[in-house]
Image (cartoon, rainbow, N blue to C red):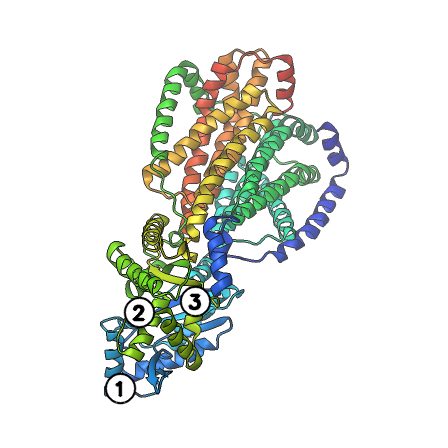
């Protein structure tokens, strides 16, 4: 470290210019970052449900739909005319595979032994009698295209395979809003949600990022008491952030719903580096040292601790690389690169800038009688005298936290991305009410599908599902088509008695009609069929309940006639939940081990374990609060543990300083007092600065991000409190007189 600071002091201008040039080259990669808020971005790499969905897609094509419920007096000529115009317009939108609405819905008729399809609403300006006939037909068929009261109609827009989901989800609502003026519009579907998330991310990056910057600046000024320190910190963070974003762009990884979290984490953590370094620099100046000597002291005494703290954050985030979820791997990469960029900026750019700038005016070292110093002195004496009660209190909090942990409910539903009273959720809920469910579960059956026994079993399943699974919507299968065909030929709405007759009716249907619907239900080999079951778009607990009920019923009903697999895009959230819980356990466990190893490089293994034990109490308490407060464990809040270990390792400065004071021969009580008055002050302001940065996330319009922000404020402050109370007590209790080897390592770290 001594050689490095001498190099920077002797070549400050080349270092500054070189850093600017390198940053400019690296940050060009930021232009390569593309925003990806599609629902597929949250899918794990491997899961049985996803394997089934891939098989469904290969056999029957894409089934991703955007569903709209259009309000108005549907059974009138002007409204039907408007619906026809809108349907035609939507069919012309890029990326649309098929549009299904009342305007292009066809009814089957039989003429001279042939099946004909005729448009149910075949022309403009239908007469009252014709409209009445349409209504009678739809009600007789129990069609879900129009609500029973005639006040809402449904339009389904199917997306082509490979189309950009966010763009599709933005283009279709725009076309619907432009083409429908008769009443209220409500939309649902994965593409609609992706577009809403995309819009929110863009807004969050501006609002949340700006607010975080302002809050961090306020606490930096309160800490430094000068513009000099604030400006230098902002310059350091600016360059570090751009290095991180540039490197991230060159990796080719996209930005997603968690990008805002990554940006704020880099901003908050990066500013803490300068807070520690410049805090030591100003402290040395206040003791009467020259600028150069103060920089040397800053680099040799405090920079090693900052490096170890940064590495602790980096290894904690690197554990996310083991995740099966691409979005988590990406945010881990972003934070790793951003923190490393901020560290390089703090170690090279900040001292070089300080060296070439005029020496700031710093007051002579005051007596330690300020409000903060008096408080920290009193705290040191309190901790020294009340260690045992503090350990008991910590134990009570751990038990409280563990009880709360057992009450945590995971929820990876995309509906949870938005507040319950938001227009997005209200729109989706209305579609569920009118349409019977905007999500679906799909059964992939394999067997002799056209055998009457199988077709009758399909109808049995439909009847039992409606009766035995509360809240379930409509069930559609190839059996419905066969029933309609047979009613046309034989006048009876029943499954034909022989496979040959079923096949004959289907062949006649295929020869004279649009068979797009059938190809989505029956494979070319006629050995596989797809059954679609509508369900409401709820949280993952509700979705899992539907999934379990459907799977149990399907296994019971089809056990003797066909092999059955249960899938559907709406079940992807269950795959995400399973992967999330697995990744959470692996990431948190590995982060603890790696941080202990990293911390052991600068302190003893025992000191590292003591620090991580203090952090673990906070982690247990924060997850306990999730359970007690009813906050879901989701794609964002699962990051709490790794973030707490990473950003909370500023406690390293306290144990390092305590060991140094003991090495100098001070009694445990005096050593603790000196430690809290010096390193404790930095920890106090670091906690407040980090908390301010993460507090900005609480105003995010994405609910998981806002929940993470609120919990991280508690976490950062709780780690600060633990570092200034429980950790000192543990140091007094468990850290013996440092050995010479330990003392040498500790003296080089603060």
- Is label 3 or label 2 in front? 2
User: Dot 2 corresponds to which residue?
Assistant: 495
Q: CA distance from mark 2 to mark 1?
A: 31 Å
Q: Is residue 358 visible?
A: yes
The N terminus lies in quadrant? top right
Q: Earlier in the sequence, mark 2 or mark 1?
A: 1
Question: Left of 393 or right of it: where is 527?
Answer: right
Q: Nearer the viewer, residue 131 or 723?
A: 131
- In the picture, the disc for residue 522 is 3
Residue 587's place in the image compared with 102, above or below, is above
Q: CA distance from mark 3 to mark 2?
A: 16 Å
Which residue is drawn at the image coordinates 51% and 70% (left, top)?
Answer: 95
User: Dot 1 corresponds to which residue?
Assistant: 130
Kindly check if marks 1 and 3 are in contact, taking CB atoms under 8 A apart as contact. Answer: no
Q: Nearer the viewer, residue 104 or 475?
A: 475
Which residue is drawn at the image coordinates 45% and 48% (left, top)?
Answer: 576
Q: Nearer the viewer, residue 147 or 78?
A: 147
Q: CA distance from mark 1 to mark 3?
A: 34 Å
Image quadrant of residue 514?
bottom left
- Secondary structure at badge 1 equals helix
Image quadrant of residue 289?
top right
Which residue is drawn at the image coordinates 63% and 57% (left, top)?
Answer: 32
Q: Nearer the viewer, residue 470 or 279?
A: 470
- Secondary structure at badge 3 equals loop
Q: Earlier in the sequence, mark 1 or mark 3?
A: 1
The C terminus lies in quadrant? top right
Q: Residues within 10 Å of mark 2 (few under 14, many from 20)?
A: many
Q: Is residue 682 visible?
A: no
Q: Position of residue 449 (x, y in %)?
A: 40, 64
Q: Earlier in the sequence, mark 3 or mark 2?
A: 2
């Amino acid at each position: 470290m001594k050689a490095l600071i001498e190099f920077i002091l002797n070549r400050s201008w080349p270092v500054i210019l070189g850093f600017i040039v390198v940053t400019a080259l690296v940050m060009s990669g930021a232009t390569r970052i593309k925003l990806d808020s599609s629902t597929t971005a949250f899918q794990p790499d491997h899961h049985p449900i996803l394997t089934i969905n891939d098989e469904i897609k290969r056999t029957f094509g894409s089934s991703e739909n955007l569903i709209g419920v259009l309000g108005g007096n549907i059974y009138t000529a002007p409204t039907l005319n408007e619906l026809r115009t809108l349907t035609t317009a939507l069919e012309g939108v890029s990326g649309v595979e098929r549009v299904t609405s009342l305007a292009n819905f066809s009814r089957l008729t039989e003429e001279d032994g042939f099946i004909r399809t005729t448009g149910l609403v075949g022309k403009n300006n239908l007469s009252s009698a014709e409209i009445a006939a349409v209504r009678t037909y739809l009600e007789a068929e129990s069609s879900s295209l129009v609500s029973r009261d005639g006040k809402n109609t449904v339009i389904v827009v199917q997306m082509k395979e490979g189309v950009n989901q966010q763009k599709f989800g933005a283009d279709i609502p725009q076309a619907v809003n432009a083409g429908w003026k008769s009443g209220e519009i409500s939309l649902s579907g994965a593409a609609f949600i992706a577009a809403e998330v995309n819009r929110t991310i863009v807004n969050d990056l501006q609002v949340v990022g700006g607010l975080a910057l302002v809050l961090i600046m306020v606490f930096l000024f309160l800490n430094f008491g000068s513009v000099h320190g604030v400006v230098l910190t902002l310059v350091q963070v600016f360059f570090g952030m751009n290095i991180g974003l540039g490197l991230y762009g060159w990796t080719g990884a996209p930005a997603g719903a968690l990008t805002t979290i990554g940006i704020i984490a880099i901003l908050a953590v990066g500013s803490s580096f300068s807070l520690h370094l410049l805090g030591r620099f100003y402290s040395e100046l206040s003791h009467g040292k020259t600028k150069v000597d103060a920089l040397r002291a800053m680099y040799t005494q405090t920079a090693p601790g900052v490096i170890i703290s940064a590495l602790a954050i980096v290894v904690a985030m690197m554990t996310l690389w083991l995740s099966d979820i691409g979005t988590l791997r990406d945010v881990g990469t972003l934070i790793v690169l951003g923190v490393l960029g901020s560290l390089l900026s703090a170690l090279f750019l900040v001292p070089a800038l300080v060296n070439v700038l005029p020496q700031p005016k710093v007051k002579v070292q005051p007596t330690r009688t300020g409000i903060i110093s008096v408080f920290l002195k009193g705290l040191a004496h309190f901790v020294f005298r009340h260690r045992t009660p503090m350990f008991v209190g910590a134990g009570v909090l751990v038990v409280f936290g563990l009880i709360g942990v057992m009450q945590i409910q995971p929820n990876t539903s995309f509906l949870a991305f938005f507040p319950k009273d938001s227009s997005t959720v209200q729109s989706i809920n209305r579609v569920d009410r009118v349409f019977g469910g905007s999500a679906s579960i799909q059964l992939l059956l394999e067997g002799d599908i056209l055998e009457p026994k199988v077709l009758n079993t399909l109808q049995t399943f439909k009847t039992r599902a409606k009766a035995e699974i509360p809240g379930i919507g409509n069930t559609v299968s190839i059996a419905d088509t066969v029933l309609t065909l047979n009613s046309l030929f034989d006048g009876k709405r029943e499954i034909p008695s022989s496979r040959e007759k079923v096949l004959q009716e289907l062949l006649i249907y295929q020869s004279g009609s649009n068979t797009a619907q059938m190809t989505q239900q029956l494979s070319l080999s006629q050995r596989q069929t797809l059954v679609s079951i509508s369900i409401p778009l709820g949280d993952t607990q509700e979705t899992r309940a539907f999934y379990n009920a459907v799977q149990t019923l399907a296994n019971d009903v089809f056990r003797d006639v066909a092999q059955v697999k249960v899938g559907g895009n709406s079940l992807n959230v269950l795959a995400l939940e399973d992967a999330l819980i697995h990744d959470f356990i692996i990431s948190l466990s590995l982060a603890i081990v790696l941080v202990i190893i990293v911390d052991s490089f600068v302190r003893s293994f025992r000191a590292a374990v003591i620090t991580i034990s203090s952090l673990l109490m906070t982690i247990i308490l924060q997850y306990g609060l999730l359970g007690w407060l009813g906050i879901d464990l989701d794609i964002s809040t699962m990051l709490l543990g790794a973030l707490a270990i990473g950003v909370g390792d500023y406690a390293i400065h306290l144990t390092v300083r305590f060991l140094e004071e003991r090495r100098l021969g001070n009694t445990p009580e005096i050593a603790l007092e000196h430690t809290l008055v010096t390193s404790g002050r930095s920890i106090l302001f670091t906690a407040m600065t980090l908390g301010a940065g993460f507090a900005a996330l609480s105003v995010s319009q994405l609910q998981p991000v806002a929940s993470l922000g609120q919990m991280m404020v508690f976490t950062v402050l709780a780690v600060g409190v633990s570092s200034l109370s429980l950790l000192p007590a543990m140091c007094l209790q468990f850290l013996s007189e440092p050995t010479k080897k330990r003392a040498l390592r500790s003296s080089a770290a603060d």
